[in-house]
Amino acid sequence: MVERLDPKYVGELMRRCIKLSQIYVLGVSGPYVGSIYLDENQKIIGEGHKKIIDGTGLVLHAERDAFNNIKIGNIPKTLVTTLEPCVNFNLKKRKREIFDPCSELIVNEGIKQVYIQRVDRNPRVRTQGIEYLRRNGVYVEVLGWPSFEVKDVINNVNNEPSTHA
Ligand SMILES: [Zn+2]
């Protein structure tokens, strides 16, 4: 059992996720997404954002970018992320993405809890990522959009449609 995060700490982490999401990424269409993994002691061990893999045109989602940035020896238990993790809703739409859906990564890597800023508004995804995680025993908390905790930050964020497609 991984300890739940204090709401204030979640707010701090989400602010950091939003800043990560704003790192300029040439060629990436909105929404910009930022993610942070914590270990069992709630220490940050990996951060990332949605990006294009150099020279490939392929999209790397924030959850996977952050996961790739975890230093060897650290074990992620908690994910904090700005957007509901994707599911394998439509293979054709995923042609620019060579990786498995982030929801599967999260479950397969043994992440115990996920804190999400907002649900994906795309009807093909909306809540399915969350349902997939919960069905597989992951504790999921959705902060909502906009959340009181991050209102001061998101005022400066380009509010694009929140969808992976
Ligand atoms: Zn994804």
Image (spheres, helix red, strand yellow):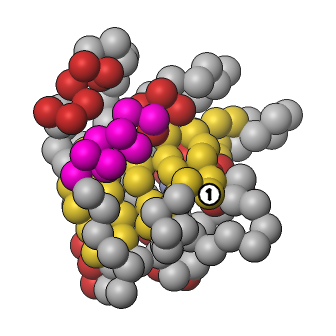
Estimate how packed mark 1 is, as few (under 14), some (14 to 19) or many (20 or more) residues with alpha carbons within 10 Å.
Answer: many
Going by the numbered disc 1, the residue's amino acid type is Ile
Q: Residue at x 51, y 51 (%)?
A: 36
Whether residue 106 appears in magenta in the rendering, the answer is: no
Query: Does residue 75 appear to the left or right of 41 in the view shown?
Result: right
Circle count? 1
Q: Residue at x 36, y 64 (%)?
A: 114
Whether residue 14 appears in magenta in the rendering, the answer is: yes
Against 18, is 48 above or below?
A: below
Q: Residue at x 53, y 59 (%)?
A: 43
Front residue of this view, candidates 32 and 41: 41
Which residues are the magenta region?
7-16
Residue 151: x, y in percent? 21, 25
Q: Main secondary structure of the magenta part?
A: helix
Q: Quadrant of the N terminus?
A: bottom left
Helix, strand or loop under label 1? strand
Residue 71: x, y in percent? 75, 61
Q: Which residue is the site of mark 1?
A: 45
Seen as rendered, the residue at the extreme top is: 156
Does residue 32 appear in this view? no
Q: Residue at x 66, y 21 (%)?
A: 26
- Quarter of the image holding residue 150? top left
Query: Does residue 15 appear to the left or right of 23 in the view shown?
Result: left
Residue 57: x, y in percent? 73, 36
